């Protein structure tokens, strides 16, 4: 039984935490929060690129570090914990992973080294309006060379250089790579309840694009990509949820009311114990997701769904009850609680809401039981 | 990351497996759960003796006590393998898991010589006599009185929820020896012979209908001072050693899980119900969360490390989930779900039986509330509850 990260992977996590706790504090996060003109933190992003984190799970032949998905998971946990206000997830978990699983040799050789160097910032454009995008009912279309339609919201859509677009092609769907600085692309930033991560509406009007993977394979590739991204996002959620538990616990020990720390009251103690239980359920499910992701296991669909569901629930509970534990202070702009509350919600819906993933999970269990 | 044994672990598993195959049959899936019949006890004693002779009885105990001198991971592997067989286990869990380790920690050399090996070989069964009608979660509030009389102590009082008292030979007994001292300071622990005059075990008629637990009455029972464990007035310190082992022992929950209700729902068409599917997903995630957390604990054991506190989440999850799953299964059956005849009902009425068993599981071995307090205080380091009984003579505490 070896259901834990290795010493090397833990060392990497420790180094990432050391860097982020010095160079990506909530003061850095607030620079983005408080300035509408800022889409992300350029200083943090520059350093993340320089350290090569974007290439963690990209093979050396494409300029990456050639480590693996387990290393990516430990970095994701630290990025989530630090609320890193940078387009890391969009570029690494979605854009680069899509190229890795479906790109041609030429596409990978061309683009992946530029992802590692920071020249290419990626995003994934799937949502078109309220509800989870259904690959069978898309309005954005691809005719084999050009994309037309509107995607909203696209995380990091305003700062990305390239997008992978889920578009209708013929009777099916395809993934299409589009240069967002090319012709036929109009981008408009949109305001969201999580301003430390930027979002845009992207209008494609005959924008040139090249297919990633087979024509009509977009639906399956979309699912496969989301299974991979879900595990990595779950680690970000886990990092955030654990940070909320620490904040709430620290505050409950220091805040006095009625002559003693509020953390001596069972209403608070039990709330925080429940938070701990949910975070442990999330951590264990995340580890299983990490194992499935790193070994391309047949169990990935249910493992990804379970890690995403457990982590979404843990972060939701931890972020809302962290505010509650802080009382009135927790509802002020200056105290950091709301930063986690905002991020928790973004991460919970960014790749499909819990409702969507519950259905995916039960469908996967049904397939497994039928087999 | 992987789920494989190390070569040494694989070797031990092979050895354990060979021993089990030689002596037992694999489970056929129909194993009953409420087993306290004489025949079961006889089989359990025989199996315990066989295990002891094979060196598999208490794997982590040192060899001088009849153990194997093995690792915690080997014990985990043994438990995993033994669980696959129709092994008559259970009656020795409390004795060997909690009582005898307490005797080893606090008993005299004579005690150890007299009791340890016999317990290990299944020749004598032990029970734990702590809880009382007015001392459950607050177990230090016991009132069973021990009064010194020459070289003996005279015991009067009542214990409750004592598992296996009616078939036990010995027990460890927590008593109050000084009512003028504050609650935790006036306690003393003894070894008690359960067959002597004045000890009477009566089964409790539980809310579930079963009678697995007991009340035990002590009327002028005499215990020699030489059978005291620890100092006079240090009973709480002794009890903590016993209790430390309890919450590890009460963990797994017998009863239907997400898979069983999913199978049942498929048969009835409920599996297409969206609300049910969402609940099923929640149960799967929580059950996986618990099972995978055990893997994390085993990883620490396998590496020879001390496991973290994450295992403390176990019973909170499993007991509540069992109750919730049974409730849903009954509601899924609508009015029919109220019936309990095992011939008529789906899954041999297992959902109905466990529905009535689940409330007890949320209480036994630490209530949900106490377990949350433990996580809050020992894991998160939050302050203890306000204690109005601190530094107050036990006899002047308010009661009710």
Image (spheres, coloured by chain):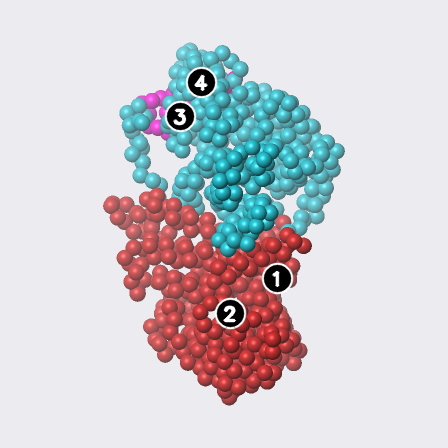
Instruction: Spot the residue most to the bottom.
Output: A183
Q: Which residue is mark 1?
A: A294
User: Chain under label 3?
Assistant: B
| Quadrant of the image occupied by residue B394 | top left
SS category of the residue bearing label 1: helix
Q: Is residue A171 left or right of residue A89?
A: right
Which one is nearer the viewer's eye here, B61 or B378? B378
Give the chain letter for red: A
* Closer to the camera in the image, B204 or A196: B204
Residue that mark 2 sits on: A133
Q: Which segment did they paint magenta? A: B175-193
Tags 4 and 1 both on a single chain: no
Q: Which mark is residue B217?
A: 4
- Rendered image: mark on residue A180: none
**For numbered disc 3, what is the local secondary structure?**
loop
Query: Residue at coordinates 45% horizontally, 56% vertically from top-left?
Result: A313
Marks 3 and 2 close (CB-CB < 8 Å): no
Question: Which residue is at the front of the view, B61 or B353?
Answer: B353
Q: CA distance from mark 3 to mark 2?
A: 59 Å
Q: Earlier in the sequence, mark 1 or mark 2?
A: 2
Both marks 3 and 2 on one chain: no
């Amino acid at each position: 039984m070896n259901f834990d990260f290795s010493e090397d992977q833990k060392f990497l996590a420790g180094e990432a935490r050391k860097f982020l706790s010095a160079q990506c504090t909530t003061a850095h996060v607030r620079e983005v929060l408080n300035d509408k003109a800022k889409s992300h933190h350029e200083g943090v992003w520059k350093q993340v690129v320089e350290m090569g984190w974007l290439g963690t799970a990209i093979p050396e032949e494409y300029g990456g570090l050639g480590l693996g998905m387990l290393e990516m998971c430990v970095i994701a946990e630290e990025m989530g914990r630090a609320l890193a206000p940078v387009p890391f997830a969009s570029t690494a978990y979605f854009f680069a992973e899509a190229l890795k699983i479906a790109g041609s040799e030429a596409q990978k050789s061309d683009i992946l080294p530029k992802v590692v160097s920071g020249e290419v910032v990626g995003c994934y454009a799937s949502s078109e309006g309220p509800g989870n995008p259904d690959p069978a009912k898309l309005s954005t279309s691809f005719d084999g060379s050009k994309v037309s339609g509107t995607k909203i919201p696209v995380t990091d859509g305003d700062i990305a250089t390239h997008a992978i677009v889920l578009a209708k092609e013929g009777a099916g769907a395809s993934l299409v790579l589009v240069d967002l600085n090319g012709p036929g692309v109009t981008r408009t930033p949109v305001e969201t309840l999580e301003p430390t991560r930027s979002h845009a509406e992207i209008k494609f009007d005959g924008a040139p694009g090249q297919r990633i993977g087979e024509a009509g394979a977009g639906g399956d590739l979309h699912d496969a990509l989301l299974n991979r991204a879900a595990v990595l996002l779950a680690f970000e959620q886990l990092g955030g949820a654990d940070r909320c538990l620490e904040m709430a616990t620290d505050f409950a020990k220091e805040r006095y009311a009625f002559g003693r720390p509020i953390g001596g009251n069972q209403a608070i103690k039990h709330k925080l114990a429940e938070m701990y239980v949910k975070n442990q359920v999330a951590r264990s499910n995340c580890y299983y997701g990490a194992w499935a992701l790193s070994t391309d296991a047949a169990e990935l669909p249910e493992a990804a769904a379970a890690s995403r569901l457990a982590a979404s629930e843990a972060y939701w509970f931890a972020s809302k009850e962290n505010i509650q534990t802080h009382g009135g202070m927790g509802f002020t702009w200056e105290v950091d609680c709301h930063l986690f509350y905002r991020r928790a919600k973004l991460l919970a819906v960014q790749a499909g809401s819990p409702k969507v993933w519950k259905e995916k999970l039960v469908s996967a269990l049904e397939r497994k039981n039928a087999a | 990351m992987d789920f494989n044994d190390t070569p040494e672990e694989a070797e031990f598993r092979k050895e354990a497996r060979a021993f089990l195959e030689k002596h037992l049959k694999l489970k056929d899936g129909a194993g009953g759960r409420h087993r306290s019949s004489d025949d079961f006890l006889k089989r359990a004693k025989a199996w315990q003796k066989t295990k002891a002779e094979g060196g598999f009885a208490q794997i982590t105990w040192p060899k001088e006590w009849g153990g194997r001198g093995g690792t915690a991971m080997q014990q985990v592997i043994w438990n995993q393998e033994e669980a696959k067989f129709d092994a008559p286990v259970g009656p020795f869990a409390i004795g060997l898991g909690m009582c005898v380790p307490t005797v080893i920690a606090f008993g005299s050399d004579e005690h150890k010589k007299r009791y340890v090996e016999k317990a290990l070989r299944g020749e004598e069964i032990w029970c734990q006599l702590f809880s009382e009608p007015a001392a459950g979660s607050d177990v230090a509030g016991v009132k069973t009185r021990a009064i010194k009389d020459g070289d003996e102590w005279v015991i009067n009082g009542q214990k409750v929820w004592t598992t296996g008292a009616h078939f036990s030979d010995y027990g460890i007994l927590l008593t109050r020896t000084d009512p003028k001292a504050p609650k935790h300071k006036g306690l003393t622990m003894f070894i008690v012979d359960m067959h002597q005059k004045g000890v009477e075990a009566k089964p409790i008629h539980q809310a579930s209908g079963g009678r697995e637990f007991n009340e035990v009455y002590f009327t002028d029972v005499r215990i020699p001072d030489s059978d005291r464990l620890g100092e006079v007035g240090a009973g709480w310190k002794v009890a903590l050693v016993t209790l430390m082992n309890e919450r590890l022992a009460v963990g797994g929950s017998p009863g239907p899980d997400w898979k069983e209700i999913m199978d049942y729902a498929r048969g009835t068409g409920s599996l297409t119900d969206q609300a049910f599917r969402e609940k099923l997903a929640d149960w799967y995630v929580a059950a996986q969360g618990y099972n995978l957390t055990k893997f994390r604990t085993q990883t620490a054991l396998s590496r020879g490390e001390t496991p973290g506190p994450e295992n403390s989440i176990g019973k909170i999850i499993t007991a509540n989930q069992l109750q919730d799953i049974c409730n849903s299964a009954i509601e899924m059956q609508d009015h029919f779900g109220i019936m309990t005849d095992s011939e008529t009902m789906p899954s041999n009425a297992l959902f109905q039986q466990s529905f009535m068993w689940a409330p007890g599981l949320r209480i036994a071995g630490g209530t949900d509330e106490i377990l949350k307090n433990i996580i809050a205080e020992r894991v998160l380091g939050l302050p203890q509850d306000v204690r109005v009984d601190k530094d107050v003579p036990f006899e002047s505490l308010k009661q009710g």
